[in-house]
Image: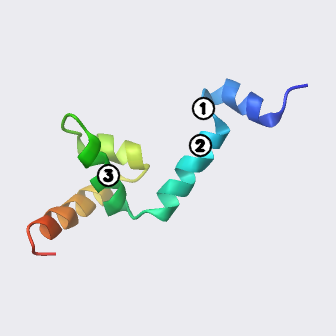
Amino acid sequence: MTDSSTVEFEATGQDPAASTALARARESATLEQQLEALLMVADEPISAVGLATATDRPVREVRKAIELLAADYDGKG
């Protein structure tokens, strides 16, 4: 007998437990925190589109959050 998590993994290629953990992490951190973490661990530049994809947010929202982060780092935020 196949359970629903096995079916989901086979259909999407993603572990349902990992998807749930990712959703919880996204809910518990602000967009700015998520972006800061991604930028700190990246070994090469990431485009706004790439960051939007990684955070599952619109590009416009990501660009605004990046502006806020930059202002904060510049001591203006």
Rendered-image quadrant of the N terminus:
top right
Rendered-image quadrant of the C terminus:
bottom left
Label 3 – label 2 distance at C-alpha? 18 Å
Q: Please, what secondary structure does the residue beneath circle 3 have?
A: helix
- Residue flagged by tag 1: what amino acid is it? Gln
Residue for badge 3: 37
The x, y position of residue 21, in whole percent, is 58, 49
In the displayed structure, would residue 70 be above or below residue 2?
below
- Viewer-nearest residue: 64 or 43: 43
Residue for badge 1: 14
Pick out the residue farthest to the front.
41
Pointers 2 and 1 in contact (CB under 8 A)? yes
The x, y position of residue 37, in whole percent, is 32, 52
Q: Residue at x 9, y 73 (%)?
A: 75
- Viewer-nearest residue: 36 or 58: 36
Q: Which mark is residue 19?
A: 2
The x, y position of residue 26, in whole percent, is 48, 56
Q: Which mark is residue 41?
A: none
Q: Specify few, some or many for label 1: CA neighbours under 10 Å numbering under 14, 14-19, or 20 or more.
A: few
- Residue flagged by tag 3: what amino acid is it? Ala
Relative side of 67 to 34, left or right: left
